[in-house]
Amino acid sequence: MTAANLDAGRARRAVAGIPFVVVAAIAGAWALAIAVQVIDAESRLHHDALIDAGPPLWEALPVFLVAWQAMVAAMMLPSSLPLVRLFAAASAAQPRPGAALAGLLGGYAVLWTAFGALAFFFDVGVHAAVDSSSWLHDHEWLLGGSVLVLAGAFQFTKLKDACLDRCRHPGQFLIRFYERGTTGAFRLGARHGVFCIGCCWALMLVTFAVGIANLAWMAGLTALMVLEKTHPLGARTVPVTGIALLGAASILFLYSAYAA
């Protein structure tokens, strides 16, 4: 099958065709996040704990990435379901559709894993800077506020809009980049991951800052990213979210400066 063979009828049938394994992955990731909250293990998975008082970095990184993968499955897969539906329908006639789906999800996961690793090592550098500077140590609230400012400002950029445009039109994306076979599916998933990271990286950094198992932030940001990427109203919520994040940063800066 080539991209030209993706007819409108197949696309319509894909609307309800979410593969069970994807639904199970999302449900399992949320169940894991809830379990972590229930047993009060959230603090032990926070990157701060892993870096400051945890195992050596070569042990801490895999632990973090496992938790990060669960968070990606819980938060990012729901926002990518329109593409997954269409891909499942388009690849159904392949000899090994399950392998193709695994390739798609694998490519997507590899990109998000790489982003998570970069964020982790960047945070290692931030911790080293704080430990070496008494001023930064006394003004750590500037770091959290800066993440909010960054995330809020990014909502108004052309890069955000361009990446969201690709994510909001999965049919066009699939027609342009679809390839038959597991390798082609992997490339498609990785390409989709690039655009997904391009529009959501700043919001995911907010989750990274507050804790990768914080249910309240996970649920709120998941709903926000699903709305931005899959609903017609998503375009209207982007600047509203930007203003809200910048407002939250201002409140944090003012409160922390006054309290200091």
Image (cartoon, helix red, strand yellow):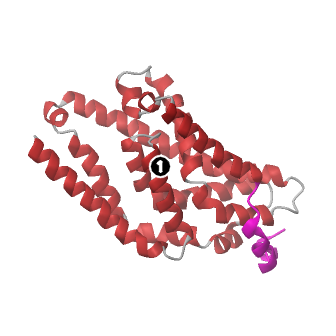
Residue 171, relative to residue 32: is it above or below? below
Please give the name of the residue rendered at 40% of the width and 55% of the height, measured from the top-left corner.
202
Where does residue 135 sit, x and y in percent of width and height? 13, 35
User: In the rendered image, is residue 243 in sight?
Assistant: yes
Magenta span main SS: helix
Packing grade of label 1 (10 A; few <14, some 14-19, many >=20) is many
Please give the name of the residue rendered at 16% of the width and 45% of the height, measured from the top-left corner.
256
The stretch of residues the image draws in magenta is 1-19
- The image quadrant that residue 173 belongs to is bottom right
Left or right relative to 142: residue 113: right
**Secondary structure of the residue carrying numbered label 1:** helix
- Comparing 208 with 135, the one in front is 208
Q: Amino acid under label 1?
A: Met
Q: Is residue 186 magenta?
A: no
Please give the name of the residue rendered at 43% of the width and 48% of the height, measured from the top-left corner.
216
Where does residue 160 sit, x and y in percent of width and height? 43, 66
Left or right relative to 31: residue 224: left
Left or right relative to 164: residue 139: left
Residue tagged 1: 218
- Comparing 220 with 81, the one in front is 220
User: In the rendered image, is residue 156 in sight?
Assistant: no
Residue 211, relative to residue 107: is it above or below? above
On the rendered image, what quadrant is the C terminus found in? top left
**Count of number-bearing discs:** 1
- Comparing 111 with 208, the one in front is 208
Q: Is residue 10 magenta?
A: yes
- The image quadrant that residue 76 belongs to is bottom right
On the rendered image, what quadrant is the N terminus found in? bottom right
Where does residue 138 sit, x and y in percent of width and height? 15, 34
